[in-house]
Amino acid sequence: MNNEPGVLAGTLGDTNTTTIPAVGAALEDRAAIVGSSTASVDVSSSDYSVLSGTSMATPLAAGSAALIWSNNPSCSGSDIREAMKATAQDQGASGRDDFFGYGIVKAKAASDYLVANGCGTTEPPVGDLTLSGSRSKGNRQANLSWSGATTSNVDIYINGSLNTTTTNDGSQSFSVNKNNSYTFRVCEEGSSICTNQITL
């Protein structure tokens, strides 16, 4: 819904190829829409256009959060946000970045994550595993070392999202943006037995 008179028309750039369906309404229609218990939206072929950017991502993320919350009503807003971050499908540079944030929202995965982990405990609990790390190559590489995992593979989380599942050989390196910091955690594959979280 537009926040000023007229039809909603955001400026979102020309090079984005993302396609997300969205419906906008004019401010003048607000009273009628808010006062209705039901509403019908008619969309014709001339009503379609390609839009992208944060003004399109925001309503999608907000709607997804509402859906996740409706399935997990005892959770807090922070629980919902952390579950969305933990289950987002990573895009662009590994981990959270300035172009893609945490990635693509996966509403069902976030809801399932809350069912499995409960509210108030959206971070996997720390087990007997330990994690340390360092940066190298002009701060462009993050090097992880862990011990204590008993599974043949481990899950590596970057900024709260599962980034990769790899062989439990005790080390892994990632190419990273030299100007950003990243949080890392290693868990036994498919479990909540995890290391401490470190920031590099």
Image (cartoon, rainbow, N blue to C red):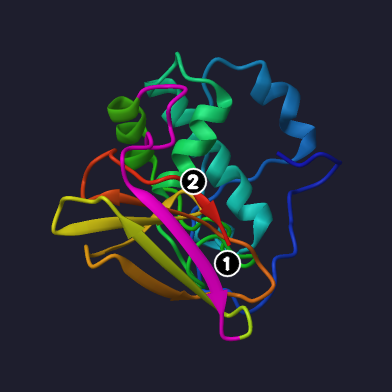
Q: Where 23 falls versus 166 (above or below)?
A: above
C-alpha distance separating marks 1 and 2: 26 Å
Magenta segment includes 186: no
- Image quarter where the N terminus lies is top right
Magenta segment includes 121: yes
User: For the residue carrying disc 1, how many other residues have a C-alpha within 10 Å: few (<14), some (14-19), or many (20+)?
Assistant: some
Q: Position of residue 168 (x, y in %)?
A: 22, 63
Q: Amino acid at mark 1?
A: Val
Q: Main secondary structure of the magenta part?
A: loop
Residue 134 or residue 93, whichever sits in front: 134
Q: Position of residue 80 (x, y in %)?
A: 49, 31
Q: Position of residue 5 (x, y in %)?
A: 86, 41
User: For the residue carrying disc 2, how many other residues have a C-alpha within 10 Å: few (<14), some (14-19), or many (20+)?
Assistant: many
Q: Amino acid at mark 2?
A: Lys
Read off the magenta span: 118-137
Residue at the disc numbered 1: 50
Please tell me the numbered disc located at residue 85: 2
Q: Secondary structure at mark 2?
A: helix
Residue drawn 86% across the image and 41% down it: 4
Q: Secondary structure at mark 1?
A: loop
Label count reads: 2
Q: Are marks 1 and 2 in contact (CB under 8 Å)?
A: no
Is residue 40 something that shows in the picture? no
Answer with mark 1 or mark 2, whichever residue precedes in sequence.
1
